[in-house]
Image (tube, grey):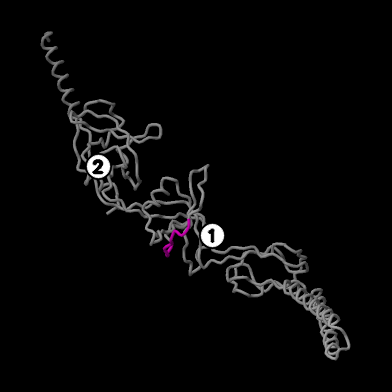
Amino acid sequence: MSIGALVYLTSCESKKGEEKKEEVRLLVTSPIEKDTIIDKDYVCQIRAISHIELRALEKGYLQKIYVDEGQHIKQGQLMFQIMPMLYQAEQQKAQAEANFAEVEFRNTKALADSNIVSKNELALAKAKLDKAKAELSLASVHLGFTEVRAPFSGIMDHFQVRLGSLVNEGDLMTTLSDNSKMWVYFNVPEAEYLNYQNGLNSNKKEAVKLRMANNQIFDHIGTVETIEADFNNETGNIAFRATFPNPKGLLRHGETGSIVITSPFKSALMIPQKATFEVLEKKYVYVVDKDNVIRSREISIAAELPHIFVVKSGLKKDDKILLEGLRQVHENEKIQYKFMDPGYVISHLSLYAE
């Protein structure tokens, strides 16, 4: 073969290689603008609207237990009985002294009415009677403290004492929870708190949902009722409290879950997550200019959906962004591309927004 023929064949192979290289087209799309709804989850702690410790008010042996652990208790129901004999004796003694003082007062009053004794003696007898009645009332109160009754209706926790054990004044006996309503606490970052306050309707409380630990949504809707006064300087968050009705008693004190806040986004600018890349915790996309040259551009994210980012800033609706092959290209590289309709791209990313 001649040298000229060899050069010709080499030149042909080179041209074929260039043609094949030019035939490689990368997929490009644009952001899509549409109204959508974003659900955002916040980790929460679930608390009973009333959760208290029941403690002994008097010292003595635990004589009777009238309830069981986990039982629903009605307000005023007798729960524990501390041995009352000593306090019964004190009450009887105080009752006898009150009866004696009352008889003495009546006799003194009859004498005073006949001007046999002075008014000062009558006043002294009246004071003794009042003192005796006060001591009787005090003894009755102490006797009443030997009966531990439910201050409100609720669910009782496990026992901290056992039948026959000696309890001292102040000893913890059990806890009681009113689960008719639940207070759910969750923390909100400062920026989201400001957005919430700016969009708040003063005549309407914010409705929220509760995602339970089994990933199911609780049947009833809650409302945000209070916001704490101060931010946590360590986390930059502030605590919100939502109230949920709990008619079936499904929720219990101490559970965890997530508060779900639904926010509408008007004319949201959305792009596929796979069209982005990250550098030093910042999000970027490759934007294709009019000369088919790609340049990286930083974007900020307003919200996140499955497979989708809602862009807050950095892109316009008409921008063309690289959809695939982000690791195969370099900054300021000229590419050949195939444009894909953004509606088609989004519809194949399992987007559930309307």
Q: Position of residue 77 (x, y in %)?
A: 63, 75
| Closer to us: 139 or 35 | 139
In this rendering, position of residue 185 left or right of residue 6: right
Relative to 118, residue 25 above or below: above
Q: Position of residue 112 (x, y in %)?
A: 84, 87
Residue 31 got which mark? 2
The residue drawn where x is 47% and y is 62% is: 243
Q: Residue flagged by tag 1: what amino acid is it?
A: Arg
Q: Which residues are magenta?
A: 218-226
In this rendering, position of residue 196 left or right of residue 86: left
Q: Secondary structure at mark 2?
A: loop
Q: Dot 2, crowdedness within 10 Å: few (<14), some or many (≥20)?
A: many
The residue drawn where x is 29% and y is 30% is: 296
Q: Position of residue 281 (x, y in %)?
A: 40, 35
Please state, as top left, top right, bottom left or bottom right, where the N terminus lies in the image.
top left
Q: Residue furthest right?
A: 116
Relative to 294, residue 182 above or below: below
Q: Which residue is mark 1?
A: 47
Q: Dot 1, crowdedness within 10 Å: few (<14), some or many (≥20)?
A: many
